[in-house]
Image (tube, rainbow, N blue to C red):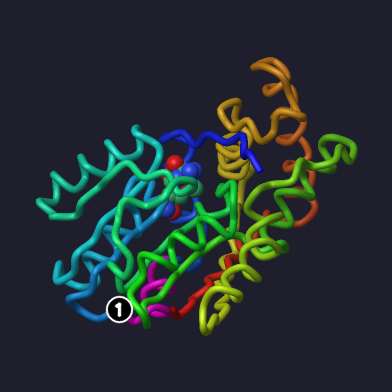
Amino acid sequence: MKINYQETTSDLATRIDIHNKFGGRNIDEWMLKTLQLTKGINILDVGCGAGKQCFSFFDYLNGEVTITGGDVNDELLQQAMAENQKRGAPITFIPLDFNQKFPFPDSSFDLVSCCFAIYYAENVPFTIGEMHRVLKPGGRLFTTGPMPENKQLFYDIIREATNNKPIPPMPGSSRYKSEFLSVIRDKFSRVDVHIFENPLAFESVEPFVAYTRASLSEDRKLWGSFFQGKDEFEAIMKKIEESAARRLEKEGRLVMTKVVGGFVAVK
Ligand SMILES: C[S@@+](CC[C@H](N)C(=O)[O-])C[C@H]1O[C@@H](n2cnc3c(N)ncnc32)[C@H](O)[C@@H]1O
């Protein structure tokens, strides 16, 4: 399965920023509490983007850890490397395409993490197989992604704004649980599912619209069936804004709940 997808640095940063500002809960704290990492381990973070989870692991373990972050997007990797240099941290960032064989021998890592990225994999058993291969026996795989019930309000408002135009299947909420969990269960000896819920509460439409823009923007080819080019994009965004304003008027605030699944699998 070929996934037509391209994340941009600014879209990703905008969404991370809105989660931080309007969400009541911190996903990195949840991740660290779930994982209970111990010092001295060797971590591979796949689809590391600008390094969010790598830096979180590094800070939590006070630097007593070896971390490699890999991503296919050069722009995001450059950003991760710049932050690494700024912090004087020794995290290694490398180009890594999870649709290809990973450049590591078998049994290399204690933890392989892959946050909000795995559902872009083209061949699910292959990518999970590579993650399993590079883990040491007893090592853990940690993945995160949106569950099917994620962000109901976001989809409701878009449906209302477009007269129920069918929403294109999002790789995250449509694939993460349904396609990946069973493959992980097949390959690993034990799998636990942890749920993180984070209601984002908006008192005005602007941050909701900014979030929607960053999700639908032209760069994200996923929404190709919704609009062609800038003018159509702006026309849809205007309708979404009007629909969001009506709902805000009616309900007093807009609450969009992120529902994330954390799968922890033991090799
Ligand atoms: C939503 S971002 C998440 C980044 C980071 N883990 C975070 O949570 O901030 C998804 C990431 O998956 C990466 N990605 C997509 N396809 C990939 C592939 N084939 N191999 C490696 N990374 C990929 C993207 O470049 C992007 O950095």
Q: Nearer the viewer, residue 146 or 247?
A: 146
- Residue 261 sits in quarter: bottom right
Q: Position of residue 27 (x, y in %)?
A: 45, 66
Q: Nearer the viewer, residue 174 or 82?
A: 174
What residue is shown at x 29% (from left), y 56% (from top)? Answer: 104
What residue is shown at x 44% (from left), y 59% (from top)? Answer: 130
**Residue 104 visible in image:** yes
Q: Quadrant of the N terminus?
A: top right
**Residue 16 visible in image:** no
Q: Is residue 150 above or below residue 64?
A: above
| Residue furthest right in the image | 163
Q: Nearer the viewer, residue 65 or 195?
A: 65
Image position of 54 (left or right of 113): left
Q: Position of residue 61 (x, y in %)?
A: 21, 73
- In the rendered structure, does residue 184 fall within the stretch colored magenta? no
Q: Start and end of the magenta stretch?
A: 28-37
Q: Position of residue 143 (x, y in %)?
A: 49, 65
- Residue 44 sits in quarter: bottom left
